Amino acid sequence: MAISNTPAQDYVQSDYSHSSRLKINGSAQEQKFMENLIVESIEIYGQDIYYVPRTLVNRDTVFGEDADSKFESARPIRAYVNNVEGWEGQGELLSKFGVRIEDKTTFIFSREKFKEKVDDVEVLNVEGRPNEGDLIWFPITKHLFEIQFVEVEKPFYQLGKGYVWECQCELFEYSDEEIDTGLAALDAVETAFANAITVGLVAGGSGDFTAGETVTGGTSNVTAEVKSWDSSTRTLIVINRSGTFTIPETITGGTSSASWTTATYNTMDNQNTTASVDQGYEFETADNDIIDFTESNPFGSVGSTTDVTI
């Protein structure tokens, strides 16, 4: 029997009849069967994770990054962890800047389940697939990973189709992004590591601020998120500032309607780091005894406890 494949098709055509075609890449039924097997395997052997899409706020088209990006939702989905013996990467490294943790791992999603659980209910920056830069929260180990690369051709077109997304991830390095997903354990990352500034307030204000609400400066229109409020010392600690509060001005809580007037604060004394790690405030205070700062700097100021324009 003579066999021909001219012009090139995804099947071999015999000389007998149309019904004798031999499908090389598999029929739609075979592809669906393979897809169901993969979905079932991931459901059995996978882990529950949360996919956290990144929302771009002010993207830099030159460098391709967004320092103001935020994370506002977390979608539960099942994923297979490819590294069953532990994390990949170089692990813990001792550098001149302290201990650096470089854990890596690979998460594998079913394309069908990713479409159902994430893509159909979220607006992704690139639709139809996981995005580099999005996050994955692994609740078992309480690790937050960032997707560095999405492999789209593994395994290589079984029966002529791709069935999974393979996401190669690294441990996420937090850099003051806003994380408000509604998932308490995940949102705690922001509370623990965001740049937290103390605002001293004048006596005579009204109401009590509540953690998590947004406060707004009446003069500067600067907004910030409340981390904590101590009414006995009139101390307000805020994160996610949009700018610099003026002294004095009235700060009002968006939810509590509390209203107080600012007295003191500085942008260098980060309450979320210890003095052994973040010594900017100590150096700024000590240098006043060494250098005469009454002379003006023609190039501007870079952090000060007295310069409220910073």
Image (cartoon, grey):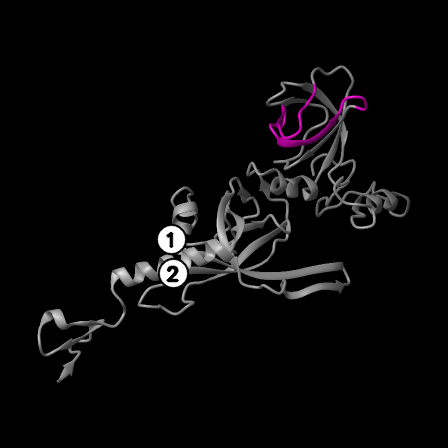
Amino acid type indicated by mark 1: Glu
Q: How far from the left and from the top, in percent, is residue 234?
A: 78, 23
**Residue 112 marker:** 1
The residue under the point 77% across, 29% down is 264
Residue appearing at x 15%, y 76% in the figure: 13
Q: Residue sitting at 60 percent across and 22 percent down?
A: 255
Left or right, 222 with respect to 192, comes to left
Asked if residue 231 lies in the magenta stretch, the reply is: yes
Judge the density around disc 1: few (<14), some (14-19), many (≥20) Cα neighbours within 10 Å: some
Q: Position of residue 95 (x, y in %)?
A: 75, 63
Vertical side of 244 occupied by 262: above or below: above
Answer with left or right where residue 145 lies relative to residue 153: right
Give me the residue at 63% from left, 18% from top: 257
Q: Which mark is residue 256?
A: none
Foreground residue, 41 or 76?
A: 41
Ranked by sequence position, the earlier of labels 2 and 1 is 1
Q: Quadrant of the C terminus?
A: top right
Residue 163 - label = 2
Q: Magenta stretch: give its range.
A: 208-233
Residue 213, compared with residue 284, is above or below; it is above
Q: Position of residue 303 (x, y in %)?
A: 74, 43
